[in-house]
Image: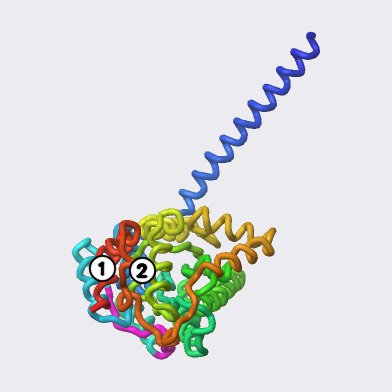
């Protein structure tokens, strides 16, 4: 009996020391992270696609942190509307109309940002596009457009920014990819292909640039309630395709609030995360893809059976806002409609 009590006491002491050690480790880790936290106050951040959606919400949160922010967009009306809002928040804002799919315009963009602010500290590659529809409706041009907006634009901005980062001895790059860059989602093939390319580019840049004190973060969001479906390019059975996409983008179980997504991106920037997968759903999907790819491929094939078939005229591209119908209206899609108003997504609908 005495031996049993002594053994129990020994186990309890060991568990107590282990718990204390874990607590000390967590406390020390927290202190270390705070001491090494990247301070955004006074830093110059360039956000591509910063006039609406996630880009605009990122700009808002960066301004709140004291950063000086440059935003760019192809749509001038959205761009200057966003600038007006950010300036009212007290932000030091540079807004430039730029097509980031054109390398020469990107080079001028980065030069203008450096000339205006005197430096460039952070690049956030957020600009992008999405096409929705069955693969048989997608032609080579759709893939080229997706690669231009989602891949080449990011490579152009990185190449233009790197000399400035190297010269000043440090820099940070955030690449907004997608769960569609980890798992090929049916009816989003040009988008997924381009995001897969961006994930590879971003991870490779992280490995190669770290030795030059340039930190690259790959951000992997799920769908976000930004209000962006209206600006998506739709093919196939337009009304039905837009309806499932808008519903998925609105449903709390399959999408996240853009405010929380932006918060996580900024946190990943501040704490130097190499990869930030923003939702539990996305984390579970990538984990499942890693250890049981056959399962997730079977699930995606099964899901595809319930997506709309092509119809006559389906090869013609239309914007989401052009094909609103009763199918895409209701209590749940209303989340997207409200987000569109808040995040400057409705200007291009006119």
Work out whether residue 118 or residue 257 is closer to the camera in this orientation and state it.
Answer: 257
Q: Quadrant of residue 113?
A: bottom left
The numbered mark at residue 92 is 1
Rendering coords of residue 262 (x, y %):
39, 60
Work out whether residue 63 or residue 31 is closer to the camera in this orientation and state it.
Answer: 63
> Residue at 36% of width from left, 74% of height from top?
49
Q: Provide the residue designation for mark 2.
A: 55
Can residue 148 be spotted in the picture? yes
Rendering coords of residue 104 (x, y %):
41, 90
- For label 1, the crowd category at 10 Å Cα-Cα, with few meaning under 14, some 14 to 19 and many 20 or more, is some
Work out whether residue 320 or residue 214 is closer to the camera in this orientation and state it.
Answer: 320
Count of numbered tags: 2
Q: Quadrant of residue 64?
A: bottom left
Mark 1 or 2 closer to N-term? Answer: 2
Based on the picture, tell me whether residue 96 belongs to the magenta stretch.
yes
Viewed as shown, does residue 230 lie left or right of 268?
left
Based on the picture, tell me whether residue 139 belongs to the magenta stretch.
no
């Amino acid at each position: 009996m005495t031996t049993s009590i002594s053994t129990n006491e020994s186990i309890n002491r060991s568990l107590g020391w282990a718990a204390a050690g874990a607590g000390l480790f967590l406390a020390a880790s927290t202190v270390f992270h705070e001491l090494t936290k990247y301070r955004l106050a006074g830093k110059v951040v360039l956000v591509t696609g910063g006039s609406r959606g996630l880009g605009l919400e990122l700009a808002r949160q960066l301004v709140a942190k004291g950063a000086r922010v440059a935003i760019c967009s192809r749509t001038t009306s959205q761009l200057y509307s966003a600038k007006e809002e950010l300036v009212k928040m007290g932000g030091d804002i540079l807004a430039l109309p730029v097509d980031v799919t054109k390398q020469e315009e990107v080079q001028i963009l980065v030069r203008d940002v450096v000339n205006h602010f005197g430096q460039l500290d952070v690049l956030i590659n957020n600009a992008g596009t999405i096409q929705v529809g069955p693969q048989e409706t997608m032609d080579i041009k759709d893939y080229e457009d997706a690669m231009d907006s989602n891949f080449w634009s990011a490579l152009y901005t990185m190449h233009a920014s790197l000399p400035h980062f190297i010269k000043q001895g440090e820099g940070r790059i955030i690449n907004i990819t997608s769960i569609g860059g980890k798992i090929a989602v049916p009816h989003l093939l040009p988008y997924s292909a381009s995001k897969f390319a961006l994930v590879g580019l971003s991870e490779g840049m992280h490995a190669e640039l770290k030795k030059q004190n340039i930190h690259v973060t790959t951000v992997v969001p799920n769908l976000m309630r930004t209000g962006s479906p209206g600006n998506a390019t739709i093919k196939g059975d337009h009304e039905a395709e837009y309806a499932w996409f808008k519903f998925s983008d609105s449903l709390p179980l399959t999408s996240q609030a853009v405010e929380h997504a932006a918060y996580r991106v900024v946190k990943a920037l501040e704490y130097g995360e190499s990869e930030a997968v923003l939702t539990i759903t996305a984390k579970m999907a990538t984990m499942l893809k890693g250890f049981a790819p056959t399962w997730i491929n079977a699930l995606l094939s099964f899901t595809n059976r319930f997506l709309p078939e092509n119809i006559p005229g389906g090869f013609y591209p239309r914007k989401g806002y052009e094909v609103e119908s009763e199918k895409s209206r209701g209590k749940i899609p209303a989340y997207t409609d409200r987000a569109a108003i808040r995040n400057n997504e409705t200007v291009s609908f006119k």
